[in-house]
Amino acid sequence: MSILVLTSDTLIGTPATGNLEYNGQFFGTDSAGSRAQLQRIVRATAVASTSGTSIDFNNIPAWVEKITVMFSGVSTNGSSQYQVQLGDSGGIENTGYTSLCTALAAPSTVAVQTLASGIPILFTTFIGSTTVFTAVLNIYLLDSATNLWVFNASAARTDANGSCITTGNKALSATLDRVRITTVNGTDAYDAGSVNIIYEG
């Protein structure tokens, strides 16, 4: 018989014996009888991507090890490449990303773009002022000592005229606590769709 041991280094307070929930946190008991915090899967509040040049999700807890960014029917009024940027207590970081975006325009056509300012979501030649797309981006903490995150994404235009996959990594200066959804030029305004994130320990 296997035993699943759940632990955390972010224990806040001590729940009474037998309590599963304490002060909004969830706890379990490991094989040694010690109570430990269970990290929840948390979905943020969806944001309409219908205005503004960037969308920020802030105050992400320090215990988070995976973030999923979701895009549904998103569009802007321009043709700049969509990107996601990570940040910490020092702000959003816009350099040092190792990102590869591979476009699949047709089964026989493959092209690759790189981006250092963020995580690319859709290949540039697929983007125009009328482009609408849907995508999912997964971001994983590989090494907490160096704040190194790796990521992968898949995206497609809703009219089926272009899809792509993205992979890469980014080492932050400190513990991640925010995510920004924007464009490379930073001036194109969102005009359709919605975005949200899910984070988990």
Image (cartoon, grey):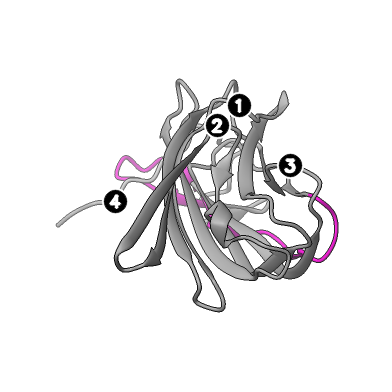
Above or below, comparing residue 12 to residue 161 in the picture: above
* Spatial separation of the CA atoms under disc 1 and disc 2: 6 Å
Q: Nearer the viewer, mark 4 or mark 3?
A: 3
Q: Which residue is mark 3?
A: 185
Question: Residue tagged by mark 4?
Answer: 4
| Residue identified by numbered label 1 | 95
Q: CA distance from mark 3 to mark 1?
A: 14 Å
As shown in the figure, which amino acid type bears the numbered disc 2?
Ala
Q: Earlier in the sequence, mark 3 or mark 2?
A: 2
Q: Residue at x 32, y 40 (%)?
A: 32
Q: Which mark is residue 116?
A: 2
Circle 3/circle 1 CB separation < 8 Å? no
- Which residue is located at x 18 percent, y 54 percent? 2
**Image-based side of 2 in relation to 159, left or right:** left
Camera-side mark, 1 or 4: 1
Tag 4 and tag 3, C-beta contact below 8 Å = no
Give the residue displayed 44% in from the left and 35% down from the top.
169
Q: CA distance from mark 4 to mark 3?
A: 47 Å
Q: What range of the chain is rendered magenta?
A: 27-53
